[in-house]
Amino acid sequence: MDVLKTRLIGETAADVFYLDALEAPALIKPSALEPLDNYITSEFEIADFEPTLLNAFQHDGKTYGLPKDFSTLVLFYDKKALAATDLSQPPKTWGGNATITQAMVQISGTAMRMKAEQLLTEFNRDGALHSLLLRYTQALYTHTTQTAACNRLHTLEERFARWLLTVRDRIQSNELPLTQEFISHMLGTRRSGVTVAASTFQEAGMIRYSRGKITILNQENLELTACECYKVIKDEFERLLGTG
């Protein structure tokens, strides 16, 4: 993406190039790309594209790109094949009673717990808890996939700002008891990189950093520094759970 931006500024970019849907808004909104509407003739069946895929490349009623592929976030299944196994629908749980992953609490606080058997019984009632857990799973999946793309495509400064804001939203406090070592693990980068980013943010007046503690001083500027992933994740949690 950085190479493409440089070539666009230097007017040496190719006339046609592949652009990821996550990167498209950064070039479409500042009018760095030419709309394709004048090139799309009546013989071209633009209606064949899924609207949700096409929307990623549209802005203010104009089309700037066409999706060439997609990755699905839902489960498709063959109803006839499933019925042959005496199941009317996919199981609500795949029967896994163990996990190879480990949950880690980032910041101390309070929590409640219940027995797994009781949770499963209540979940199978198809009531409020069932709906809540499914919506939380969807929000968490969005967070996971968006973060994976973010760590691949965005700068350390953008990711650092996004992560600080996300933690702040979770604990509802501007005081974040976090070490640079821990932050480097969360962002998948070297500690030295976090040190430089933290110093830059502190000099800009966005945070105050001392050993093992970060204080957010200017949330507005921090949001301007963060990539669009912060708002994508926040909006999805708000939509599904009523909390950012």
Image (cartoon, helix red, strand yellow):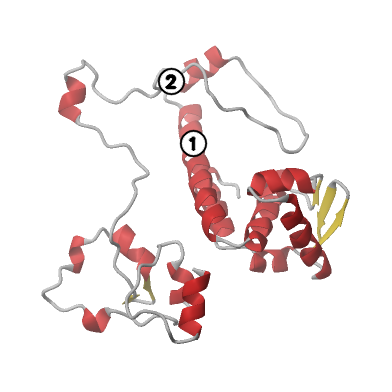
Disc on res. 95: none
- Percent from the top left, x then y, of residue 243? 60, 47
Q: Is residue 222 above or below residue 112?
A: below
Q: Earlier in the sequence, mark 2 or mark 1?
A: 2
Disc on res. 125: 2
- Percent from the top left, x then y, of residue 116? 56, 16
Q: Is residue 6 above or below residue 103?
A: below
Residue at 70% from the left image edge and 33% from the top image edge = 105
Residue 92 visible? The answer is yes
What SS does tag 1 mark? Answer: helix
Report which quarter residue 200 is drawn in: bottom right
- Percent from the top left, x then y, of residue 1? 49, 68
Instruction: Determine which residue is flagged by label 1.
Output: 137
Residue at 24% from the left image edge and 33% from the top image edge = 77
Kindly give the residue lying farthest to the bottom in the view shown.
Answer: 11
The mark tally for this picture is 2
In-image side of 113 versus 195 (left or right) = left
What SS does tag 2 mark? Answer: loop
The alpha-carbon separation of the residues under discs 2 and 1 comes to 18 Å
